[in-house]
Image: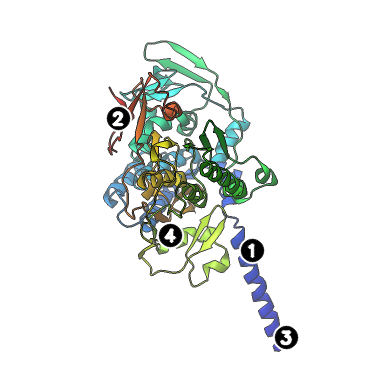
Amino acid sequence: MIRGIRIAVIGLSVWAVAGVAMAKAPRGPILLDAPTKVVQAQISRGAALEDLRSLDQTIRAMVPDGALIPAQDETNAFLSRAASSLPATLSRRQMAAITMELAGSYSSSHIYLLFPFENWNLDADRGGRRLNRSVALAPDDALLIDNRPVQTINGRAATDFVDWVKGSYGRFNPLRLPQRVREGGAEMLWLWGIDGPFTIVFRDGSQEVIEGVAMSRREHPLASQSQPTSQTQTSQAPFSLLIEKTIARLDIETLDQRFVGEWEALMSELQAGIAQGKVTSLIVDLRGNRGGAGRLSVGLLKVLTGTDVPMSGGKRWKRSKAYEDGLAEFVPPLLRFAPWRRAILGADGVAALDSIPMGETRLFGSNGLPKVTSILPSNRVRILIDHNTGSSATQLARAIQFFKLGELIGAPTSSSTSELGEIAFFRLENSQLVFASPSAEFLDVSGQRTSGPVMPDVLVCGDNGLFEPGRALDVALNMNPPDVRQILKPVFQANASESDYCGK
């Protein structure tokens, strides 16, 4: 009897240790891409609609209170239209398109669908090609390739593509639509069902065949975060500091916490330069920085103020059964049975959080606002931002603006600070697509929800009536280039386009 008890205790201990080990290295993110047989398989219209309903149910269960989401009647109407318009069977690419369109209607949060990388890689293996020309939207929403209005692409109307982009992305954030087309046109065309060679018929009747460039295999964006290799661990730090003539230039591609040692050394160098008078001006380039570890941002704020400055005014989460059931696949078995059970999957593992009553939203982490004094004059600190500045980089920019530590120059960021948070991943059962959404919402440094992206103090516009963040450095260096316009203190307008801000 005693021996049996010992065996049971040992077994439970091994199970517990295994659960803890899994918590440190969850398999979820590594398995986000489905097996090839799932990718190549078709799913039925009914299964697709079931996935769409599941997506809607989960999002509604987990979004923070007060989030602007479409009414249930609107979503039901969308599903009814899909039921009548979808083919009897769908490819995974078609499923990705319709799923992204539904996710795009939840404009209050950065809910997004992870690209079906297996389909991309299959097309790359068979010799598929992507467009490698300048893509833009004209003020009248005409699709431009090499600044020429397009009539058709491979026989399909360019206006249909623009309408699809609007439906998939426009409601997500109106400011982002032109940039998304310019910067992601190749991926969008592919997701729409087109890859090269591209037969382009322009509106003036002329025609051109563009071969494009070979599609190369792509690794899932979370794979390197979830299972870093020795190569990524020893690669060059994604930030640098250059000091010339008392001007410090800090370029930050991403706030990668794997390089925390290098970051702290960089902050020490910058702090010493300011204290010794070797640095009297600072330019921080956050353009293209999609975020990373917020604690690295805190280090920069401390250099600028000499004290700890919060990155947000707190955050809140909402607990629901649908949320937990959707996340269960990515949670180690031991945590599923633990009292708290609610867990958030991050790039570095699973963090178990304390339990809150089902259906309740909790605000936590707000400690009030400190009194902050800038060490450098605020007009000598300039932060460069653009539409690809996101997540914790957006929080950093907003904190600098809120505490009046510097001046933001460039274009609006990708999202507002209230749209940021821990990300939870969910796999749709039938299509095996994965979508992601914030499970906890960060609030502004003032503790309030904000509307729209973080707007720069100086908006940089080009002669074409569009944002020109590429010239933000020239503005920051007081070069005042004559071919750009500088608009001071622009105010966010929910339905505005780039030309509405930059139009003459």
Circle 1: residue type: Ala
Looking at the rendering, in which quadrant would you find the N terminus? bottom right
Task: State the CA–CA distance, disc 3 to disc 1.
Answer: 27 Å
Nearer to us of marks 1 and 4 is 1
The mark that comes first in sequence, 1 or 4, is 1
Taking the spot 27% from the left edge, 50% from the top edge, the residue there is 73
State the image quarter where residue 169 is shown: top left
Q: Which residue is mark 4?
A: 323
Mark 2, residue position: 501
Q: Residue at x 39, y 11 (%)?
A: 205
x 65%, y 74%: residue: 13
Residue extending farthest right: 3
Mark 2 to mark 4 CA distance (whole Å): 39 Å
Distance from disc 2 to disc 1, alpha carbons, whole Å, reads 52 Å
Look at mark 1 in the image and give the residue it sits on. 21
Q: Is residue 387 above or below residue 426?
A: above
Q: Amino acid at mark 2?
A: Tyr
Q: In this figure, which colouring scheme has been used for the structure?
A: rainbow
Say which label, 3 or 2, has the lower sequence index: 3
27 lies left or right of 207: right
Instruction: Look at label 4 and name its amino acid.
Output: Tyr
Query: Picture quarter containing residue 365?
Result: bottom left
- Name the amino acid, label 3: Arg
Dot placed on the residue nearer the N-terminal end, 2 or 4: 4
Left or right: where 15 falls relative to 396: right
Measured as percent of width and height from the top left, residue 500 is found at: 28, 29
Nearer-the-camera pick, 128 or 180: 180
Residue placed under numbered mark 3 in the picture = 3
- In space, the residues marked 3 and 4 are separated at their CA atoms by 42 Å
Tell me where residue 296 appears, x and y as whole percent: 52, 49
Q: Secondary structure at mark 1?
A: helix
Residue in the foreground of this view, choosing between 204 and 137:
137
